[in-house]
Amino acid sequence: MDGSTLTDSGYPRVVKSWRRGTPIEDAVVVFEGEQDDIAASMYAYHDRGHVHEFQLRSITFYTSKYFYRPLTVDGIAGTTCDEETAPFREVPIPEDAELGTFADMAMVTLRSDFEAPGGVVFGTGSLVTLPMSDLMDGDWTGAVSLFAPTPSRSLSGTTECRDYIILKLLEDVKTRLEFWRFDKSSRKWTRQDGGEDADVPVG
């Protein structure tokens, strides 16, 4: 290897599609990052009945560009990524935001204030969810903020179950859990009461 497939930081820059049982030399380039990026990657996964595929340019340790295409269960099982005809599209979110999914919903964590199309401003540290298809079309009218920080309240982590996302909050130097249930038929989130067990002692 001559290093041409690596970034200046020494991480992978080129992604290839390789079919098992064929010479590695026959692998097809399907994605490339920039030479001065930190790294480039590509990944696909199943999420509660939906299939997502992303290409990711890690520009710096704190900024990235995401490219996305939805897939079908049959499609990902029977088609290699170089043969898939659905195009990737750049995800229209700030470069310092983090992106995940829950079923067919986008989960966007903001590192800076963001004025969404339509004029609604979501603050630094917010966790915002909206249908992935709406996000790709730049339609934030159905966006819901599952968490918005305050001077005494921040989001320190999340955990997912089949129908729930659990937020681990730090509030007045005390850890608290907040439960949100997702109804896939209505695509709505409902906050659940965690009861006394939602307060978690620290130390």
Image (cartoon, helix red, strand yellow):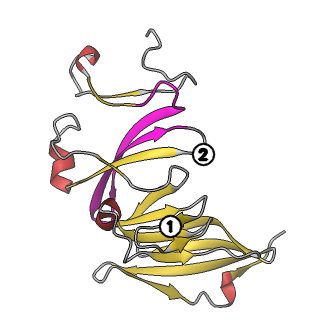
Residue 117: % across, % down: 41, 68
Q: Residue at x 21, y 34 (%)?
A: 82
Find the distance from the CA under tag 2 to the CA under tag 1: 19 Å
Q: Position of residue 194 (x, y in %)?
A: 60, 87
Q: Is residue 23 visible?
A: yes
Q: Residue furthest top?
A: 2
Q: Residue at x 50, y 80 (%)?
A: 180
Q: Residues within 10 Å of mark 2 (few under 14, many from 20)?
A: few
Name the amino acid type tagged 2: Tyr
Q: Which mark is residue 115?
A: 1
Q: Nearer the viewer, mark 2 or mark 1?
A: 1
Point out which mark residue 62 bears: 2
Percent x, y for residue 100? 45, 58
Q: Secondary structure at mark 1?
A: strand
Q: Earlier in the sequence, mark 2 or mark 1?
A: 2
Q: How many marks?
A: 2
For this orientation, the residue located farthest to the right is: 203
Does the magenta stretch mainly form a helix, a strand or a loop? strand
* Tag 2 near tag 1, CB within 8 Å: no
Residue 129, position as x, y percentages in the image: 44, 70
Question: Left or right: where does residue 123 sit relative to residue 4?
Answer: right
Q: Amino acid at mark 1?
A: Glu
Residue 34 among those drawn in magenta: yes
How would you rate the neighbour count of disc 1 (Cα within 10 Å): few for under 14, some for 14-19, many for 20 or more?
few
Q: Is residue 33 above or below residue 169?
A: above
Quadrant where the image shows the N terminus: top left
Taking the magenta stretch, the answer to whether it contains residue 147 is: no
Regarding residue 161, the answer to whether it shows in the image is no
Residue 73 figure quarter: bottom left
Residue at (16% x, 36% y) in the render:
83
Q: Which quadrant does the C terminus fall into?
A: bottom right
What segment carries the magenta color? Answer: 33-59
